Image (tube, helix red, strand yellow):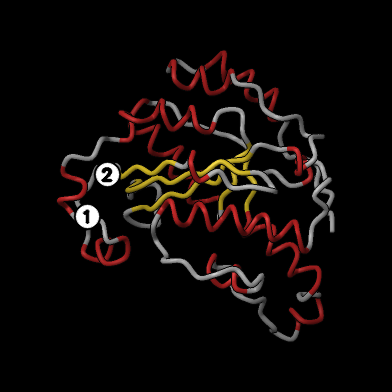
Amino acid sequence: MSLFKPAPLEWQQKFAQKCQRVQDARLQRFYAQPLPLACTPINELEMVALDFETTGLDARSDDILSIGLVPFDLQRIYLNQAHHWTVRPRQNLSEESIVIHRITHSDIEHAPDLETILDEVLQQLAGKVVVVHYRHIERDFFDAALRQRIGEGIEFPLLDTLQLESDYLSQTKGGWWRRLKGVKLPSLRLAQTRRRYGLPDYSAHHALTDAIATAELLQAQFAHHYDAQSAVGEFWL
């Protein structure tokens, strides 16, 4: 299955413009790293799955609590290159957050601020296509967190496994007549989506585990429903 969707942005051009405009040297290095061309087949890409755990769901008032990432392609997941950081948010942890993420006040007491590890995080993402499950968390929180800390945000292309699943289900199980009847699509949550592909359940709300789970899910989606030779420009957002 291939869904032709023209890339909403010419990302190479956008990166070149941003490299000239941003003031932070870390962002300059990030934008200077060449991106894959939009015509690059998915099965030739170097990708990195990224997951944030956050203190809440509103990027305007909440903050990043932990970061997990793992490089992968459609054949392999490179666990020996995975990274995980707990970072200190700029507000106190709520009881609900502690219960969900199992990250306590003592865990973040000596954790670095995001700005301290920013260069290392950006080095892991530079030049690769980032893969997430529900882009509004990673995209919105990363941008807001950097604006708060260095006065400049960040943009980069993403593959969103939630969007891929939604597109597939809408075409195969969510025709207009079903929507008129009020038939809902199956859950798009990470764990429930993975189960439809026979992937195992992992403990939720751990940034690195969820990044690995997202990488496995993208591999399964292209193995079952999408053409692995499709150009990345058909899918990135």
Secondary element type, mark 1? loop
Q: Give the alpha-carbon distance from disc 1 to disc 2, as whole Å.
A: 8 Å
Location of the C terminus (image quadrant): top right
Query: Which residue is found at the position 47% from the left and 49% from the top?
Result: 51
Instruction: Name above or below for residue 32 compared with residue 37.
Output: above
Location of the N terminus (image quadrant): bottom right
Query: Which residue is found at the position 20% from the left and 56% from the top?
Result: 104
Marking on residue 89: 2
Instruction: Name above or below for residue 199 compared with residue 114.
Output: below
Question: Which is more toward the observer, 228 or 150?
Answer: 228
Q: Position of residue 13 (x, y in %)?
A: 70, 22
Crowding at label 1, few (<14), some or many (≥20) Cα neighbours within 10 Å? some
Crowding at label 2, few (<14), some or many (≥20) Cα neighbours within 10 Å? many
Q: How many marks can you see?
A: 2
Marking on residue 93: 1
View extreme (front): residue? 80
Query: Which residue is found at the position 81% from the left and 75% from the top?
Result: 175
Secondary element type, mark 2? loop
Q: Are the residues flagged by discs 1 and 2 in contact, CB closer than 8 Å?
A: yes
For badge 2, the amino acid type reads Pro
Q: Position of residue 163 (x, y in %)?
A: 66, 57
For badge 1, the amino acid type reads Leu
The answer to whether residue 117 is left or right of residue 201 is left
Q: Position of residue 191 (x, y in %)?
A: 53, 69
Marking on residue 59: none
Q: Position of residue 171 (x, y in %)?
A: 80, 68
